[in-house]
Amino acid sequence: MTEIPAEIEKASFRSDVTVELVKHSAADSDVLWAARVSTAGEQSLEEVTKDPERSKGLINFLMRDRHGSPFEHNSMTFFISAPIFVFREFMRHRVGWSYNEESGRYRRLEPVFYVPGEARKLIQQGRPGKYEFVEGTPAQHELTGRVMEDAYRHAYEAYQEMLAAGVAREVARAVLPVGLFSSMYATCNARSLMHFLGLRTQHEQAAVPSFPQREIEMVGEKMEAHWAGLMPLTHAAFNAGGRVAP
């Protein structure tokens, strides 16, 4: 059944993203018992209850010498709200990730849209692979916000007009822009998250420069903060190793 709105719903605008850690099974000790099974067999189970601080040297060794599989025996599930264009970049990360996103076929999409905040740099300089962004002028910020908001309102009014006429949601959604907010669950392990962070964040300790779009970097920063609290030794070793996934 197609939803028919009683009245034109007003669009709302935001410049942030949200990341919630909804469930996890992730600790530094997971790395230790996974690594030590190669030499200790069943005795590696003792690592499950040991203080991982006593064995952080092993975590550093594994990270440094790129022994990656022990970092896969954990899981984190995030609930993320961000613009659709962020998710389209996000889903290029396939190995070690699982996704489920809200569907415009099965629900009416809410009129929440992304508009860059004042801190968002607007001017792109340089060549591909070596971009630099610099501040925009007040006039450019005003223009960006005004034009985006006008376009979003027009698109969502067209969407609602089609729904009101009985057009299926999966057809009507085609007029909506990629600045529309969506939500998804994303599940990963520490190794796949490290690979994501190495590409989608800039960091002073990174051995390999990265030039991510700011909006996906905002998501990455929030995910990293959650992960750092769960696996502080692994996170520290990742930074010390140049933020390159093992």
Image (tube, rainbow, N blue to C red):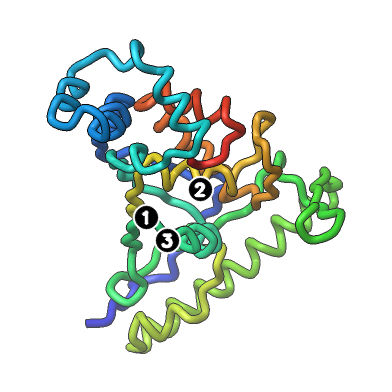
Pointer 1 and pointer 3: residues touching (CB < 8 Å)?
yes
Rounded to the nearest angstrom, the CA distance separating label 2 from label 3 is 10 Å
Mark 2 belongs to which amino acid?
Phe
Pointer 2 and pointer 1: residues touching (CB < 8 Å)?
yes
- 80 lies left or right of 1: right
Rounded to the nearest angstrom, the CA distance separating label 2 from label 1 is 10 Å
Residue at 43% of width from left, 77% of height from top?
160
Marks counted in the figure total 3
Looking at this view, name the residue that lies furthest to the left.
Answer: 42
Rounded to the nearest angstrom, the CA distance separating label 1 from label 3 is 5 Å
Looking at the image, is 84 positioned above or below residue 135? below
Q: Is residue 11 visible?
A: no
In the rendered image, the quadrant that contains the N terminus is bottom left
Mark 1 belongs to which amino acid?
Trp
Residue 75 in the image: state x and y as whole percent. Answer: 28, 42
- Specify which label sits upstream in the sequence, 2 or 1: 1
Residue 31 in the image: state x and y as whole percent. Answer: 32, 31
Mark 3 belongs to which amino acid?
Arg
For label 1, the SS is: strand
- Specify which label sits upstream in the sequence, 2 or 3: 3
Local crowd size for mark 2, using a 10 Å CA cut-off: few (<14), some (14–19), many (≥20): many
Q: Mark 2 points at which residue?
A: 196
Residue at 65% of width from left, 66% of height from top?
150
Q: Which mark is residue 94?
A: 3
Local crowd size for mark 3, using a 10 Å CA cut-off: few (<14), some (14–19), many (≥20): few
Q: In which quarter of the view is residue 72 placed?
A: top left
Residue 169 in the image: state x and y as whole percent. Answer: 35, 80
Q: Name the residue under label 1.
A: 97
Q: In which quarter of the view is residue 183 placed?
A: bottom left
